[in-house]
Amino acid sequence: MMLPVRRSLALAATRSSRQLFLRPRTSFQQPLRFAAAYTTTPRLRQNAFHSQLESDIPPLKTASPQSPQTLTEKIVQRYSVGLAPGKKVKAGDYVTLSPHHCMTHDNSWPVAMKFMSIGASKIHNNKQVVMTLDHDVQNKSESNLKKYRQIEEFAQKHGVDFYPAGRGIGHQIMVEEGYAWPGTVTVASDSHSNMYGGVGCLGTPMVRTDAASIWATGRTWWQIPPIAKVTFTGLLPVGVTGKDVIVALCGLFNNDDVLNHAIEFTGSEQTMRTLSVDDRLTIANMTTEWGALSGLFPIDAVLQQWLRAKATTSAMLNPDLNSRGQFTHAKIDELIANQLTADPGATYAKSLYLNLSTLSPFVAGPNSVKIATPLKDLEAQNIKLDKAYLVSCTNSRASDIAAAAKVFKDATKEDGVTPKIADGVKFYIAAASLVEQREAEETGDWQVLLDAGAQPLPSGCGPCIGLGTGLLEPGENGISASNRNFKGRMGSTDAKAYLASPEVVAASALKGRIAGPGWYEKPEGVEKVIIGEGNGDFVQDKAMSVEEALDKLIAEAESMIANAEKEVLGEGVAAAAAAPAEAEVESLTEILPGFPEKVEGEIVFCDADNINTDGIYPGKYTYQDNVSVDKMAEVCMENYDKEFGAVARTGDILVSGFNFGCGSSREQAATAILAKKIPLVVAGSFGNIFSRNSINNALMGVEVPRLVQRLRETFGEKALTRRTGWKFEWDVRRSKVTVTEGEGGATWSQKVGELPPNVQEIIAKGGLEKWVKSQISS
């Protein structure tokens, strides 16, 4: 018979032979899952605010100095504080981050109010903080202008770098002014901070409360996500852009393949040379829509050439700056001398590839980035257009404006008169920054678009976030070069929004229907887009398949051993052998005084996956700082379902599908649910930033995929919001949920992730802001 110790030895031997077979090849692992405080996987401890809990955490084992790291891990290593000597950070680690820079925009005043409310009076490092005004720049109301004045005065008082309304979109400013520097960690209280990855800077979003913490202490907490490698092969064809690349990735890998991952893009030098820095910024920007927390490009020759050009221009235009400039050749020399690259053998949670040579122009939509269609297929449908937009930090740089202008230049007849946009179409343009607009003006491209009938808007977010002039009306079709086309994002929920490259947007405005300029040159022999798992290298991917086969063998071995134990020892003895593990799972969580041991209520089911923060809390209210709690409760979930407010009741348990709370970083997505007096959200999975916002704002949440499955099996036909009559109970002490499937229905239970005392304390205090305040006052 096989005793437990022999079972362990047998499995160890199987794994050892697997390792011997594979050496010295790069190690690959199955995807890891992380969900902040929300998970169905039991664990011993959850760190909430690492910089404040450091003394409570046992020392981590020092990793081997030879442990290979990804580029993401290496950059995080540089900006982590309080690490044990010799510690090498890896995916999954909680770290205390001291980011190179932290940017806030129109939300700077709410952050300042949080900062002051926690008792802070001085910014820890004013050179770390950048403030820009970019979201609601068309709003000339006294309340908005007052807020803008308050932000500017606060910045001046604390000596913070400040950029006024009309100067540009914050993310573009961070790049063009050199704040987002290669090899650094730079964060912003905005979900499109991923864009900084286009210049080799690890950019990731933080929420307002995190920003206030960084202002006060210079630090915040972060868990390093699982890291995915995306390999590009081939060469980008003529007529295909970075926008087509990311639209294709979002639409073709559309099963949450990189949800809550950090992405590293890579490829051969020849391949990567076909992706300009502007293309990379676009791709990195929209990794947010793909579900990722960052999108990092390598610090390679393409980037170095771009930096050199910036440094030369800076030296010519600002000779008095010398070494004080953001872009200098000396600074670039230092970057190259200490260049960071991923180590050979670094571990990635997953690997995907896309053959750029097989890509053609793509369009996303309608109303979803997960729907990607080749342009030629949509052209054949003759989709009438009402509005076109060349706006946003995604695609309104000078190169994008030039591409759009070329569409009209190519259509100019012999008389030299620029053709006009189609009758009935409105075409809105706004540069990513004033710097980019001036460059477009100097080349004449800006004027070409004005002559064609385009309507200029101030440099800012505007229609992209559903603010200001030119929003979509009910029944209209719009096409935009921006990054989001969620239902209701750019105007009416009854409109259809598509996303495409600047040249496709311009060609569509010219022709009055979704259309391209005809620039695409299809490579010989290309019939379909080639994508897949792995690196796109047959030899390496075959090796990966061998490892996956070995993983399967190990799983089969474990099953055979378990069955043998049952046959030889009997069920009771085999169960007893597993008892120690079961006892560990059944361990009780300490409950702080005053924190509820159980949370229970009736389930109200919103049967949809990927309900984004626009659906939970409409963007038009996001930058109104005087919205009452009652109003927040009234509009909660209205972009998802206008009837939600009438169906949901106080004390309900809100249950939804997978990736709940994806999208932007607005904290109101959590606070609006609390305003509706819903104490707990249950989902198949959560968007990472929603998880963070929930903890920081005292909203409880837990992942129970089985519950979502049972609800869908039971109720069949979808309803946007449904009262189920089912009861849900979360036993916090036992880390267990119990579901009663209606009156007289089945009752079942399962273990879920622990809500440990440190997270309870944050929630009990009313959120991270109040918790930090209590720490300061004590």
Image (cartoon, rainbow, N blue to C red):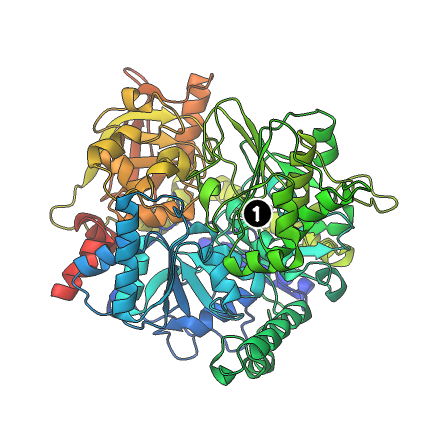
Q: What is the x, y in percent for residue 240?
A: 73, 48
Name which residue lies at 60% across and 52% down.
Answer: 283
Residue 704 versus residue 276: which sits nearer the camera?
A: 276
Q: Nearer the viewer, residue 56 or 128?
A: 128
- The one nearer the camera, 303 or 749, is 303
What residue is rendered at 24% in x and 24% in y? 649
Up the image or down, 499 lies above or below 25; here it is above
Q: Is residue 508 above or below residue 338?
A: above
Residue 161 located left or right of residue 744: right
Location of mark 1 (residue): 555
Secondary structure under tag 1 reads helix
Is residue 28 in sight in this rendering?
A: no
Residue 196 seen in the figure: yes
**Quadrant of the rendered image containing residue 742:** top left
Could you say where residue 264 lies in the image, as x and y percent from the top left?
Answer: 58, 59
Q: Residue at left 37%, top 74%?
A: 83
Q: In this view, does 698 lie to the left or right of 752?
A: left
Residue at the (74%, 51%) spot, across then down: 356
Give the image location of residue 674, x and y in percent: 24, 37
Q: Position of residue 185 (x, y in %)?
A: 45, 67
| Residue type at the position of mark 1 | Ala
